Image: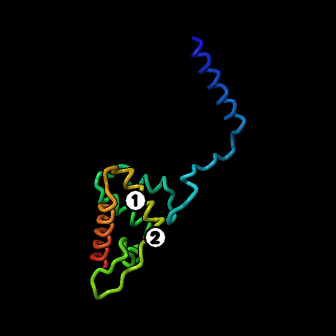
Amino acid sequence: MERELDNVKEELKCLKWKVRHIGEPEPPHPEDSKRYNGYTLTELKAMVQFENDPYKAAHKILTALFSDVYLLQHSVAEQACNSNSAPMPKIDPELYMVYCNILKSLFPGISSQTLREKTQHVQKRIQKEVQ
């Protein structure tokens, strides 16, 4: 009985605070204060939260963070595709880290190597679509 009374008192305090602060905007969540190519971290995670296929999730996040042209002109590995071409510039490390963190949270067992492979696969598919 005493525990219930304490719970009711605590709830009453919370309600009183809410009444005093009606109409005030809620402070933004820390992860929503920064935008990545126009998307918050929460929005990016929501895009793939129900995705079961790592490739489809990678494709959605990559195309949200980077344009097709950017993906075709940048590399994850900063290596030349063949010996006759110069190495492409490396993909933006901050955005790539966001991408990796989202996929690792969704697919905990995924390795960095697999993420690179998924990224390169998305890049190859975009290249085929452009041709």
Q: Residue at x 55, y 54 (%)?
A: 32
Relative image position of residue 116 (x, y in whole percent): 32, 65
Snapshot colouring: rainbow
Mark before the other along the chain sequence, 1 or 2: 2
Measuring from the top left, give residue 84's x and y in whole percent: 29, 88
Quarter of image, res 59: bottom left
Q: Amino acid at mark 1?
A: Cys
Disc 1 from disc 2: Cα separation: 12 Å
Residue at image location 62% in from the left, 19% down from the top: 6
Q: How many marks?
A: 2
Q: Nearer the viewer, residue 51 or 77?
A: 77
Give residue 76's quadrant in the image.
bottom left
Task: State the residue lying farthest toward the bottom.
Answer: 84
Position in image of residue 31 (x %, y %): 54, 53
Residue type (three-letter) at the residue carrying disc 2: Asp
Residue 34 vs residue 70: left or right? right
128 or 77: nearer the eye?
Answer: 77
On screen, residue 61 versus residue 24, left or right, reads: left
**Vertical relation: 30 (above or below) 16:** below
Find residue 92 and name its label: 2
Residue drawn at the location 30% of the way across and 62% of the way down:
113
**Residue at label 1?**
100
Quadrant location, the N terminus = top right
Q: Residues within 10 Å of mark 1 (few under 14, many from 20)?
A: many
